[in-house]
């Protein structure tokens, strides 16, 4: 991938991270983390994977740019 591809992917992942965190916040506000723990865990997994992928693309972007 070219640096601009890594940057584009990292920015798209930022959207996924923000949207997932907002969903987690709403779920917690309504007690769904307690009522639906399996679904809540899946949201946490999505967030964790997106953060790790974003970190990897950012690292690759910086490595190739500099």
Image: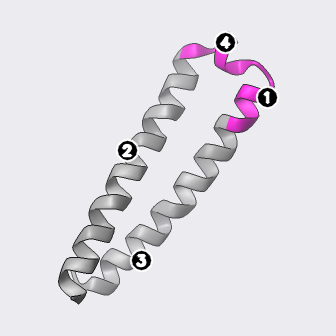
> Along the horizontal axis of the image, is 16 left or right of 59?
right
Looking at the rendering, the stretch of residues picked out in magenta corresponds to 25-37
Residue under numbered circle 4: 34
State the SS at label 4. helix
CA–CA distance in space, label 4 to label 2: 22 Å
State the SS at label 2. helix
- Mark nearer the N terminus (4 vs 2): 4
Q: Which mark is residue 55?
A: none
Q: Is residue 32 magenta?
A: yes
Say if 45 sits above or below 1 in the image.
above
Residue under numbered circle 2: 49
Q: Residues within 10 Å of mark 1 (few under 14, many from 20)?
A: few
Q: Which residue sits furthest front? A: 66
CA–CA distance in space, label 2 to label 3: 17 Å
**Residue 25 coordinates in the image, percent (x, y):** 70, 37
Q: Residue at point 43% right, 34% down?
A: 45
Q: Residue at point 48% right, 67% down?
A: 12
State the SS at label 1. helix
CA–CA distance in space, label 4 to label 3: 36 Å
């Amino acid at each position: 991938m070219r640096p601009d591809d890594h940057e584009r992917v990292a920015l798209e992942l930022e959207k996924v991270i923000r949207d997932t965190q907002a969903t987690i916040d709403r779920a917690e506000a309504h007690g769904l983390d307690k009522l639906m723990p399996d679904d809540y865990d899946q949201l946490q997994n999505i967030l964790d994977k997106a953060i790790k992928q974003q970190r990897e693309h950012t690292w690759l972007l910086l490595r190739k740019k500099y």
